[in-house]
Amino acid sequence: MSLTLKRIIMVTLGVLGACMVWPCLLAVQYYQTAFPGYLFFSLAQGMLFGLFFGAIFGSFEGIVVSSRPKAFKGLALGAAAGLVAGATGVLAGQSFLFRAAEEILSTWESGRDLGIVAANGVGWALIGLFVAMIEGFRSRSARKLLVGLAGGIVGGVMGGAALQALLFLFPSSQYALLAGLVLFGFFLSFCYSFFENRFSWGSVKLLNGPLKNKEYHLVKARMSVGTKSTCDIVLEGYRDVEPVHAWVGMRKGRMYVTSAQTERPLKVNEERTNEAQLRREDVIAVGSAKFMYGIFS
Amino acid sequence: MKKRVITGVIALAIAMHAAVAQEATITQIDPSSLLATQTVKLYLDAGRSSGPVDAATLKVSESADGVEWREVPVRSVKRNQNREEGISFYLLLDNSGSMWDGLDGKPTKDADATRVAHAKRAVNDFVSNLSVMDRVALASFNTNFKLVRPMSADASGIPSSLDGIKKPARDEAYTELYRSVAQAINGFGEDGRRKVLIVLSDGENFPLDAAASLARAEDGIDAANREGVTCYVVNFSESKDSQVHRVALESGGLVFDARDADELAGIYNSIRDNVLEEYTVTYTAAMLPGDRRYVKVESGGAEATRYYFTGTVLGSNTKPAAWYYLLFVCLPLLVWLALLLFRLERETDEAGIQLLYGAAGTKTKMFTLTGAQTVIGGSQAADITISGNPALKAEAATIVFDKTRQEYTITAGADLTVNNKPVKSKKLEPGDVINMAGTVVVFDNPTRTIVKGGKDGKK
């Protein structure tokens, strides 16, 4: 799978998440008066927001590696992490808006509405930040947290500005929120995908079999390879592959592949090995699956 | 006699204000605890309210539109809380050219007789009477706004700071009143105290470039309401701005006229006394949609209204759910399922080689191996021609298919590597990487790869 296709899938997922969260948010907002206070109102909206975006982004990894169990597991874990991240993000954003909006607005000698856009934009950046970091929490990867941090802030600011601009131009339209959320989902996922590529240490490309041409970005410090759905690279439909067969990871600035010490061998450039430092165009054989290490995208 | 005049002027001003402001005034709203505890604190100048002002007699209502009101529970009503918590005062002094004239508006050579000298004496007198709990900031304005001393609990430096206010040059001598008021309101910061801005000016808003200046009195009113600042305006000449009094009255403040330093000092101290007498009301806010929340306080026949900001980061909605909302959940779910079920990659169904890297600009391409023998090279005579690489020999490699064993073997026509190892001849396995003078291809063959859990089970 090329980087472009991967980005298209990521962006599609972001847009799908936005579409799903829109009616749910409207429904909660309609019942605003039934909430005991802004705290619970913000928590409910944040949890809904995080639930959908977390679930949909959590399933991304499973979809791109064509592993359904991994996708469903990611969906569940992403939803759970999303509940917390969304609630935290919206609370942070709302808290900022309440506390700082008035401060920011009063600095504008004219155009206070634009001040609201700016204050909300920062609020959305906070939401985007927490939502984009869900994948990092889910996969317990500091590197992915960093990707989420960068992608979330940039995507959140861009998406939040677009959303607020639409709400500013069409204040009474519910579809402005929909369009804004779609743009938010688009920017968030695009920026996440962009930074994932920027932060990756290269990639491995599958050269044969049912997942031929699929590329895996090496973003985590240690990525597992095997048939288990919990592996980062899931090799379904390949001969002689162990549940956890090998690890690919970065150590002291160098990329290594390490055998999980199974009966079935790990080979690099046709030679059996327990551990080998990888160089560009090295061919790694895990059972019948063959990868090439490099920077393809 | 002089004191009686001062008292009379102040009493008149307060009385006029009370009449305009419907007898009671919400001087400041502090919604900083709204998100955490759903409570709002407001400061109330009860004015001519008859009878006691307490939680039992005070009625607080909120509205999203200023029309339909909902009564909200009052948690506490306290008097003199400003005395315990302290007050943040922001003193904004006019330093335009006319402030360096005498009290009669005519130029004077006596520095002590100028309006600005009177103003400095009044400010010195005022800060010397502040409580240790109070904070004070000082700024001057003419064509430009200048922060002389930032908000601080230490007022001891104010006298020397006042000495630093010098006569402006000709092009700096204008009166940017509205813009300076808005800037001062922004200078309070967030400390949870009562915020009071005292503006002293001897003239009208008179910017250097009136056409270019966008500042209006409304900006000051909005900023004061949003920032929770009460603005007091002291006119120090016969000439008065026609709009700045609105900033004072609509932010819960007062307008005064003063003629000399004694009157000024009396006014400054009277403002402080007035603020100290205010009530602090804490109540539980209602849950209403919208960015603006109106508050109405009724007590003993007196009434006051004001608004504060309640916008939510995810917006608000007053329309009920429609049937098609369901589509926005179901359709994306179907697309998600389609993405999950549709495999974007699939195994090759025929033997072949795939070009990975070639000459610059060469795209990844698949060549099928159909015959018993396939020659790969740079010449047009080869069975598979890979152009663009001058280093690639005309017949760089030959792949031979053994029908009996169903095996492919590569034979080198020039230097080549398979999986980064130099070879002359080698039986090919699916996924083998062949490098011919920098042109890299991958061999693949469907019959050799899948079995375990695979669908075709070709082996």
Image (cartoon, coloured by chain):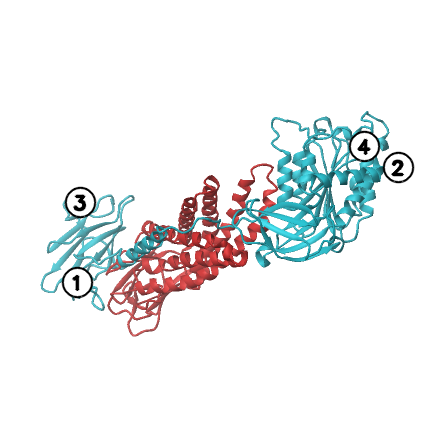
Chain colours: A red, B cyan
Horizontal side of A102 relative to B96 (left or right) equals left
Query: For the residues marked 1 and 4, what is the alpha-carbon distance in whole angstroms?
Result: 100 Å
Query: For the residues marked 2 and 3, what is the alpha-carbon distance in whole angstroms?
Result: 112 Å
Answer with mark 2 or mark 3, whichever residue precedes in sequence.
2
**Three-letter amino acid code at the position of disc 4:** Arg
Q: Nearer the viewer, mark 1 or mark 2?
A: 2
Residue at mark 1: chain: B
Residue at mark 4: chain: B
**Three-letter amino acid code at the position of disc 3:** Ser
Query: For the residues marked 3 and 1, what is the alpha-carbon distance in whole angstroms?
Result: 30 Å
Task: Give me the disc on residue B379.
Answer: 3
Query: Could you say where residue B367 lies in the image, as x and y percent from the top left?
Result: 18, 51
Residue that sits furthest to the top in the current view: B106
Circles 3 and 4, Cβ within 8 Å, touching? The answer is no
Query: Could you say where residue B70 lies in the image, as x and y percent from the top left?
Result: 57, 51
- Mark 2: which secondary structure? helix
**Three-letter amino acid code at the position of disc 1:** Thr
- Can residue A26 be seen in this snapshot? yes
Residue B3 or residue B104, whichever sits in front: B3
The residue under label 1 is B447
The residue under label 4 is B115
Query: For the residues marked 3 and 4, what is the alpha-carbon distance in whole angstroms?
Result: 98 Å
Residue B285 or residue B265, whichever sits in front: B285
* Residue at screen point 63% across, 45% down: B306
